[in-house]
């Protein structure tokens, strides 16, 4: 079994102790962070999601796998952040109201920090009013919203509506993403951009802000 396959198994099993060690070993053995993330960590969460959907696995196990993935991302962080030229733009980023999924948001944030973006992480379950306050306070170039549930993606549209009502929608670009979100949905709610994954989110953000 390759180190990346082993890592995938450890994340599925929720082995908090071994998984970060194997993450570092895989990198030391020559795997790049993107490979580790895509083939090890994200692939593991896909299996966890499938098992949860068909009732083979329950929330505590899903949570343990999520914690394990986060500890692996922490181990990778020094390899990703600070390796690229500074893009110099300010971003506020949150998972929308009603939604507590953190991993995708944290991964996109990590990649954006690696590209030099200054991020204000608003956390999870961020109400439209909180996004509004953050835009007022930090004067970001970009406001990013993540949603993992079909039932919470509507909060993205409500946030954009609130920024419009308050008259500050045009002061900031808005990018959305997360598993149920699509390009068509992003257009429907009036976002400026959508990205399907962390790598393309960085490129999309640079494109929206003319930083390429
Ligand atoms: Co949840 N959950 N969960 N969960 N969970 C999903 C999303 C689900 C697909 C599982 C399933 O049924 N197969 C399903 C959603 C179904 C749907 O709505 N379509 C689901 C459900 C139903 C639920 C609960 C309702 C379960 C329940 O209570 N009955 C509940 C809801 C809680 C809430 O939010 N109110 C719930 C709870 C949880 C846990 C707390 C246990 C845990 C989260 C822990 C944590 O985040 N700290 C959890 C987990 C771990 C998952 C799965 C297994 C993994 C999510 C993940 O981290 N993926 C997930 C199944 C799956 O995704 N395969 C599932 C890895 C991550 C890197 O991917 O977040 O998609 P992702 O991010 C990607 C892209 O989407 C994109 O880039 C990232 C990197 O490539 N991206 C952006 C994300 N944000 C972006 C923003 C951008 C651009 C790109 O620009 C701004």
Image (cartoon, rainbow, N blue to C red):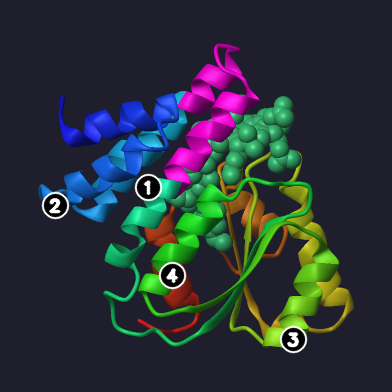
Q: Residues within 10 Å of mark 2 (few under 14, many from 20)?
A: few
The residue drawn where x is 18% and y is 35% is 3
Residue 181, percent from left and from top: 60, 47
Closest to the camera, between mark 2 and mark 3, is 2
Residue 203, percent from left and from top: 39, 68
Disc 1 element? helix
139 left or right of 178 in image: right
Q: Is residue 59 magenta?
A: yes
Residue 81, percent from left and from top: 35, 70
Tell me: residue 19, above or below residue 133. Answer: above
4 or 2: tag closer to the N-terminus: 2
Task: Quote the CA–CA distance across marks 3 and 1.
Answer: 32 Å
2 or 3: tag closer to the N-terminus: 2
| Quadrant in the picture for residue 78 | bottom left
3 or 1: tag closer to the N-terminus: 1
The residue carrying mark 3 is 137
The residue carrying mark 1 is 72
The residue carrying mark 4 is 112
97 left or right of 40 in image: right
Segment tinted magenta in the rendering = 48-70
């Amino acid at each position: 079994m390759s180190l990346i396959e082993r890592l995938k198994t450890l994340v599925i099993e929720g082995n908090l102790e071994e998984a970060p060690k194997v993450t570092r070993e895989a990198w030391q053995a020559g795997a790049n962070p993107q490979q580790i993330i895509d083939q090890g960590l994200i692939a593991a969460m896909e299996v966890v999601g499938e098992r949860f959907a068909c009732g083979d696995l329950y929330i505590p196990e899903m949570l343990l796998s999520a914690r394990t993935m986060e500890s692996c991302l922490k181990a990778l962080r020094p390899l990703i952040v600070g390796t690229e030229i500074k893009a110099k733009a300010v971003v506020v980023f949150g998972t929308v109201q009603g939604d507590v999924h953190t991993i995708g948001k944290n991964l996109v944030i990590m990649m954006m920090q690696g590209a030099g973006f200054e991020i204000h992480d608003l956390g999870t379950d961020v109400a439209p009013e909180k996004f509004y306050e953050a835009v007022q306070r930090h004067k970001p170039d970009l406001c990013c919203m993540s949603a993992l549930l079909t039932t919470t993606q509507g909060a993205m549209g409500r946030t954009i509506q609130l920024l419009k009502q308050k008259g500050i929608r045009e002061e900031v670009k808005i990018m959305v993403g997360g598993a149920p979100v699509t390009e068509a949905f992003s257009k429907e709610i009036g976002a400026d951009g959508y990205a399907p994954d962390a790598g393309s989110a960085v490129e999309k953000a640079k494109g929206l802000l003319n930083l390429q």
